[in-house]
Image (cartoon, rainbow, N blue to C red):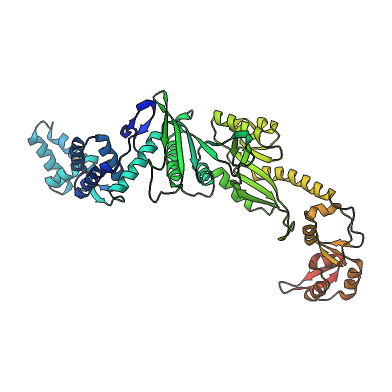
Amino acid sequence: MLTKDLLRVSRAGGGYHPQFAGRADRPLAARTIGVFQGHVGEPRHRLDDALADLEREADDFKLVRGFAALLEREAVFETRSPLPPERVRRVAFESAEAVGAVVDDATRARAIESAADRLGSDAEAVERSLYADRDVNEVLASFDARWDPDDLIEQYNLSLAQTALFDATEVRIRSSDPKRLVSAVKRLGLLYEIRRKGGRDSDDPATEERVLVVTGPDALFRRTRRYGTAFARLLRSVAATAEWSLSATIDDRGTDRELHLGPDDVSVPDVEPVAEPTYDSGVEADFAARFSNLDLDWELSREPEPLAAGARAMIPDFAFDYRPAGAGSDSDPAPPFRVYFEVMGFWTPEYVEKKLEQFGSVADDVELLVAVDDSLGVGEEVAALDHRVVTYSGTVRVKDVVDALGEYEADLVADAAESLPGELIPDADVVDLDALAAERGVSVDALDAVSFPEHERVGGALVRPAVLEALATAIEPGMSLSEAESVLDDHGVDDASAGLSRLGYRVAWEGLSGGTVEEK
């Protein structure tokens, strides 16, 4: 992005048209590169003089300054002096006070000679060092431009467009890869919404055309450099897609003007993608890291499919899929119960109002859990829209989210239990409860309401009394633990601890080498 004073736009026809560089400007781009290359090893003021001469010869001095501003980012300047400049100035000023007022060249020379004596050097070294650290005296140490003239023009056009968009109140983007673009917007921390083409008449938000609407820096109640920089970076991701178009409303000193961009205006080879942090914000990353460490029946995923919300669409930050251990199978997987999760953090009042409208337009069969920053003060309003709410300050408390998911889970277990018969009589003598739950497509907890008249629950298994009687005969006090485990395993009982406990035994441990079975 360029500084505002280098912006070149036309307002013809009431629009807002950046004055992009073209093929005809290639010689000027090449000369600007040449000026930098030709001044390696020279002080900055000589480079500035050469660029000023080029500006006077060019048709538009702002174009030269724009090229130079980009090239200067590739230049390395350094201070070169025989002595430390700050120390030299301090000693020189002290010497000047000693010799009296410096009113002419002679007294100045005496002060410099005195300073040189005190520094153990000579007058020439003092003169060269006195102001060597000032910007104009820094030396162009190296210049390794990434761009040839054509690349410089393309980079200039991208930077010019970014600068023009800094005064945008709203940007509307159509792209051949909308989901990738939304991911970039979220990772950059920009305020956005998705408008569905066709509005409420469209039934499939996953396939319809959607317009991504991003709030521009100028629309914020307090413009921040950080937001503006992130906003400028978005254009790189837009330009990386195969097909795209962008229109923006620009606040041009109090007058709204329309800006339109497309691939013919901004085309950057090897576009730098948006940095791919794992999560959109520190709040989300912190929550996801802590949640993933829990052993729950809920699977966390990021940026799920878009949800229809009236004339708009929304992509929640996360989704929780209920996948109880063992439920479903590879051949007939049980469809997961999904809870969408949105984190409401730093949003403007206008954006909060739009978001609440979205929440109210989500389909009735969508389960939505919303974490609301306390500072927004809209938790009750979200809850009134029949969505579950947790509040947070600083970080989202995992316990609050787990408790909310637990409410869903309790309902799911109850519903699953209602679908089961009052009693079950499995054919096998020993039945693993996880396997039985998977066969029935429910969680293990749902089996708590079922009676098993021909089996007894032993740990995580159902065991017929005949098997327990056979085990009671085969296992006796004094038997080693390894022998007892082998007997249990032969009868299909995997949980040795639960099996021995049911038979009235415990293990007398003998260090780390094993143990012996004894009566309780």
Q: In which quarter of the image is residue 405?
A: top right
Question: Where is residue 3 drawn, in percent x and y?
Answer: 34, 35
Q: Is residue 368 visible?
A: yes
Q: Which of 182 and 107 is in front in this view?
A: 182
Can you say which quadrant of the picture contains the C terminus? bottom right
**What residue sits 49% from the left and 49% below the top?**
276
Q: Is residue 459 shown above or below 187?
A: below
Residue 500 position (above or below residue 356)? below
**Residue at the spot x=23%, y=42% of the render?**
28
* Residue 469 relative to residue 140: left or right: right
Closer to us: 474 or 409: 409
Q: In this view, does 182 lie above or below 348?
A: below
The answer to which of 481 and 267 lies nearer the viewer is: 267
Where residue 123 sits in the image (x, y, percent)?
12, 45
Answer with left or right where residue 297 lies relative to residue 25. right
Say whether residue 74 is visible. Answer: no
Please give left or right for residue 476 compared with residue 223 in the image. Answer: right
Q: Quadrant of residue 50?
A: top left
User: Residue 355 location in percent, x, y?
Assistant: 60, 33
**Apparent side of residue 257 relative to residue 146 in the rendered image (left or right):** right
Residue farthest along the left direction in this orientation? 106
